[in-house]
Image: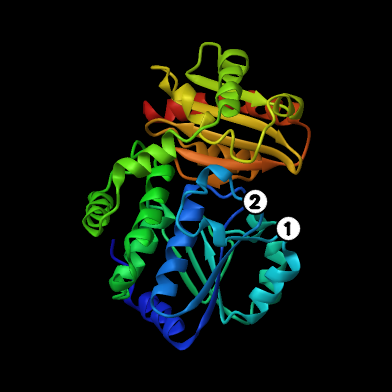
Amino acid sequence: MLLPQADIDNFVKIINNNQSFVLTCHTNPDGDALGSTLALCKALNNIGKSATVITPDLAPSFYSWMPGFKTLHTYERETEDCDKLIDAADAILIMDYNDLKRVKTLGEKITSVAHKHLIMIDHHLDPLIDPEVKFSYPEASATCELVYNILKAAQLTNAIDVEVAQNIYTGIITDTGGLSYNSSTPDLYLTVAELLRIGIDKPAIHEKIFNNKTIRRLKLLGYTLSHKLHRIEKYPLAIMTLNAKELEQYNYNTGDTEGFVNYPLQVKDVIATAFIMERPDGVKISMRSKGEFPVNDFLAQQFNGGGHKNAAGANFNGPLEEAVERYTQNIVPYYAKWLKAQTK
């Protein structure tokens, strides 16, 4: 991946001329959000810098095996301490998100210290943040891929130890569904090869990512697939929903439903699926697709969401039933219009 030299030079200048850094990621952090922040944090520590990761809310416990996880600070639980860390920092890094709405009240704090150096590293479309240094590359498979290439271009490969490499690989694997989507560039596989040369234990990482579930989560998945998965009749579209009562019944913890949205795509003629879930802070909508069907465009039009062509999400401030109705009423005409355009 070729990165503009001017951006790399500015990144290096900020790193070299400052000592204290705070790295932030989006709410309900996934493997890429955690992998990118923890990897870059450790790399900065390895070159003698003071660096800390702050998440807006609690990170899922099934990522607790990741190097550096125990050093995370949670803004909603440690607001006062986190504010002090941010106030003392020379630079703030915005990782794996491009809109301050994605970090809840942490965004207000970041806005209040906009006079500090701000660096954004992200791979989502249409950034709504304008920092001093911006690495915004939607074509990247994961923010972790960007982190590796930035460190490499900045001639900081000496800072990439096995723990840094492990976190980078975790983000790549989780954000591509095990290299099944958003993962068709040769450069990505060269990056993976280099991480293997550094010494990551690939089988162990896969075991921890894919075989690290609880009985509670598996039961919730079984219920969702058997009772809440519906095919939209006559169309290659599927939908799953969960309400607050159902989540409570299975003692839901943050992250328990991660990956659920992917399962309907195993049906041979389903090309797009949605998972709509009721949460205390609103309704969360996730979509996945196969081939050229652009779920990011659909969610942008209907829910002000975004993401990648085959993997996107949105939030809806309203009842679950209203979100489901809006989805079902609009996905079929959208699909029909898209199909017609494909056959021209």
Q: What is the quadrant of residue 252 in the picture? A: top right
User: Residue 58, labelled with which disc?
Assistant: 2
Above-or-below relation of 131 to 96: below
Question: Is 122 on the left or on the right of 145, as rendered?
Answer: right
* Label 2 Cα neighbours within 10 Å, binned few <14 / some 14-19 / many ≥20: some
Residue at left 27%, top 51%? 192
Q: Give the answer, above or below, for where 93 lies relative to 59.
A: below
Estimate how packed mark 1 is, as few (under 14), some (14 to 19) or many (20 or more) residues with alpha carbons within 10 Å. few
Question: Is the residue under label 2 in contact with that under label 1 (CB below 8 Å)?
Answer: yes
Q: Secondary structure at mark 1?
A: loop
- Classify mark 2: helix, strand or loop: loop
Which residue is labeled 1 in the image? 77
Of the pair 302 and 9, the residue shown nearer to us: 9
Q: Quadrant of residue 268?
A: top left
Amino acid type, label 1: Arg
User: Is residue 124 in sight in this rendering?
Assistant: no
Does label 1 or label 2 sit earlier along the sequence?
2
Residue 255 located left or right of residue 164: right
Placement of 1 over or under 185, stated as above or below: below
The image position of residue 153, as x and y in percent, is: 30, 71
The residue under the point 44% across, 26% down is: 339
The quarter in which the C terminus is drawn is top left
Viewer-closest of 242 and 124: 242
Residue type beneath disc 2: Leu
Residue 24 location (% of width, % of height): 57, 63
